[in-house]
Image (tube, rainbow, N blue to C red):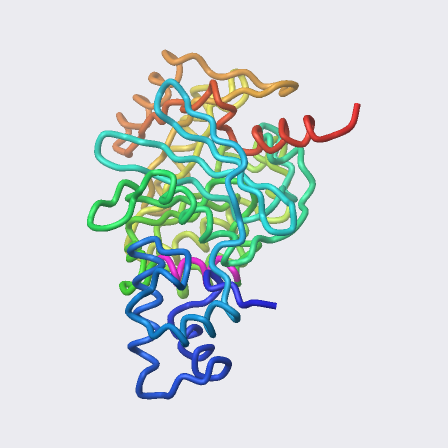
Amino acid sequence: MKQNLLDLTYEDLKFFLNSKIGIEEKKLNMRAQQIFTAVYQKGLSDFNQLTTIPVELRKVLDKNISFNDSKITETHESTDGTLKFLVELLDGNKVECVYIPEKTRGTICVSSQVGCSLTCTFCRSGTQKLVKNLSASEIVSQIILVKNKLKDWGDQKIVSNIVFMGQGEPLINMKNLKTAIQILKDKKGLNYGNKKITVSTSGIANKIVEAADEIGTYLALSLHAPTDKLREKIMPINKKFKIKDLIKQLKYYTSVVKEPIFLEYVMLKGVNDTEDCAKQLVRLMAQFPSKVNLIEFNSWPGVKFQPTERKDIEKFSKFIQDKGYMSFIRRSRGDDVLAACGQLRTESEKKSKPN
């Protein structure tokens, strides 16, 4: 079985070239850099295109290494420019990723698992069973596929930011997440800095210290409620990891990374959008460096929640700002292309089932 190149960090690649291909020590750096640069900076996906390497070596590499085993099977473009992709993995499982263009940046939202185990009641992915953790290559391939689609190679960087906010809980897939981010950050490859990558967690408190020490990117907490009582109703994970436990770990994260935590807060009408919730949220934000993103709820068929009206979101945001804290309103994107997490995969599975 071939080794998937996208599973290998630069050091892993050097080891593989030496131990499996037989490239001598003095040429390892040169050959590894040629391959890394070709794949991650030029978008090459065939060793025959790598003309800086001798023909015979190219043949050996081709026999032993594969590039990207995933493929885009559906592309949906929203009227607001958002692109939603359904990606089929080599094993037939499917995940979603989204490209969100903005004036000053372009962001890819990637998945870390097939399905999800956390059953958040407002999230479409929460209705899907967890199938598996994605490998590092299955994570990285989402970025490669979208960059191919956008012809984003060379000096330009259409895709400027990466957020782990797609399907799944990234910190449950810590090992493969760390490998994928190491590949994404490598200066010889895609060269995304810590401030260009955000990992979003629902609050796996016992993994946050490890993330601070070994990942070091921006961290977002999917908070969505300011008290344990309310959060447990919409996010069952809170029964295991209480808000006080999260605060302790988030304080550590900010002390190491020296950046504030982004609090994700989806606005649900009559649930978490009251003035009392805003007051509780301010008390929480006072305990560690943070900013809050208030998110317009992207509804889906069968969900019991309704989106908070825009004027009420603005009122909620102003209350937080008036208390001296940073609050942003993230408008809903891609409503017409099932852009909320898990929607496109769910619809795809419905179509594939026999009547």
196 sits to left or right of 68:
left
339 sits to left or right of 294:
right
User: Among all residues in the image, which is located at the extreme bottom?
Assistant: 25
305 sits to left or right of 259:
right
Residue range highlighted in magenta: 176-184
At x 60%, y 51%, the residue is 90
At x 53%, y 63%, the residue is 175
Q: Position of residue 104 (x, y in %)?
A: 21, 34
Asked if residue 329 lies in the magenta stretch, the reply is: no
> Which picture quadrant has residue 323?
top left
Name the one closer to the observer, 236 or 211: 211
Q: For the image shown, how many numbered marks are present on the structure?
A: 0
Q: Position of residue 326 (x, y in %)?
A: 28, 34
333 sits to left or right of 328:
right
251 versus 48 height, above or below: above
> Which picture quadrant has residue 117?
top right
Q: Position of residue 302 (x, y in %)?
A: 66, 19
The secondary structure that most of the magenta stretch takes on is helix
At x 36%, y 59%, the residue is 39
Picture quarter with the N terminus? bottom right
175 versus 29 height, above or below: above
